[in-house]
Image: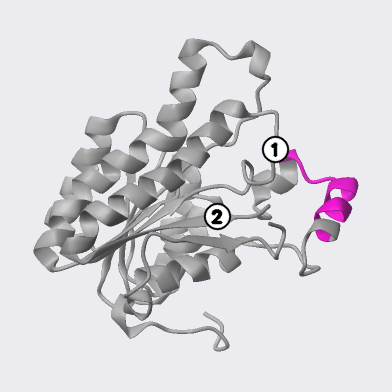
Amino acid sequence: MSEQFARYPSLRGKVVFVTGGGSGIGAEEVTQFARQGARVAFVDIADAPSEALVETLRGEGLEVPLYRRCDLKDIAALQAVIAEVGRTLGPITALVNNAANDQRHDWQDVTVEYWDERQATNLRHQFFAIQAVAPMMKAAGGGSIVNFGSISWHTNSGGMPAYTTAKAAVEGLTKGMARDLGPFGIRVNTVIPGWIMTQRQIDLWLTPEGEEQLLKLQCLKDKVYPPDVARMVLWLASDDSRMCTSQLWVVDGGRM
């Protein structure tokens, strides 16, 4: 970890659970939590990058994250993994609902089945992960939940209505659960990334024209990368943000 960035003593030994932690922003979150001395568990559906991440962190001499393959559309499997983590690592007191898939689709082609699958992929698991970790957090005297939204619906992005609907709903989930869980010392926030330069985004959608337009829209004239988002998540999971809840935290270089 670069010496120019913060270290959080309250994260050392904290049990952190990250969904979609095998690549992209999620892998950066797993990495940075591990470097802070947290005890990290994560789920993903892609074994190869997830196992490679575990080995990379092992090579750094860090406590090895616990990885389990899990399709987040299978709520019973997700909650079983969360229970396993609670038994083996200790009570989860930081949950990062990171996983999502921003698949493009034409509104005219959307079927009921596809709509339901997109909600299950991008929204439903966030609530049920909260439901599973909240009793652990209550018993521990508090915790931090970080849900992931999206800049897409804030900027009137088209071409993926099922995705933007799910991501808009995440903010409502955050607001309601912050109220319900606040009396137990559990904080719930939403992180809203801008266009983050993950390898997937670069491979699928970044063009010279798109990059030029993005930098025109942003106040800060530099691309946003996974570590920029992960550092916000670290702060929200730490005790430094202990009185911050029910809020939207935008990391987009000033695009919104």
Q: Are marks 1 and 2 in contact (CB under 8 Å)?
A: no
Badge 1, how many Cα within 10 Å: few under 14, some, many 20+?
A: few
- Percent across and percent down for residue 245 are 36, 64
Q: Earlier in the sequence, mark 1 or mark 2?
A: 1
Q: Which residue is mark 2?
A: 192
State yes or no: residue 37 in magenta.
no
Considering every residue shown, the one lying at the far bottom of the view is 3
- Percent across and percent down for residue 223 are 74, 62
The reply to whether residue 226 is in sight is yes
The residue lying toward the viewer, choosing from 136 and 179, is 179
User: Is 88 displayed left or right of 182 in the figure?
Assistant: left
Residue 203, above or below 137: above
Q: Which residue is mark 1?
A: 157
Over which residues does the magenta segment extend? Answer: 204-215
Badge 2, how many Cα within 10 Å: few under 14, some, many 20+?
A: many
- Percent across and percent down for residue 206 are 79, 46
Describe the element under mark 2 as helix, strand or loop.
strand
- Percent across and percent down for residue 151 are 62, 49
* Residue drawn at x 44%, y 61% as measured from the top left: 247
The reply to whether residue 59 is in sight is no
The residue lying toward the viewer, choosing from 92 and 165, is 165
Question: CA–CA distance between discs 1 and 2?
Answer: 14 Å
Q: Quadrant of the C terminus?
A: bottom right
* Tally of numbered tags: 2
* Residue drawn at x 52%, y 79% as measured from the top left: 1
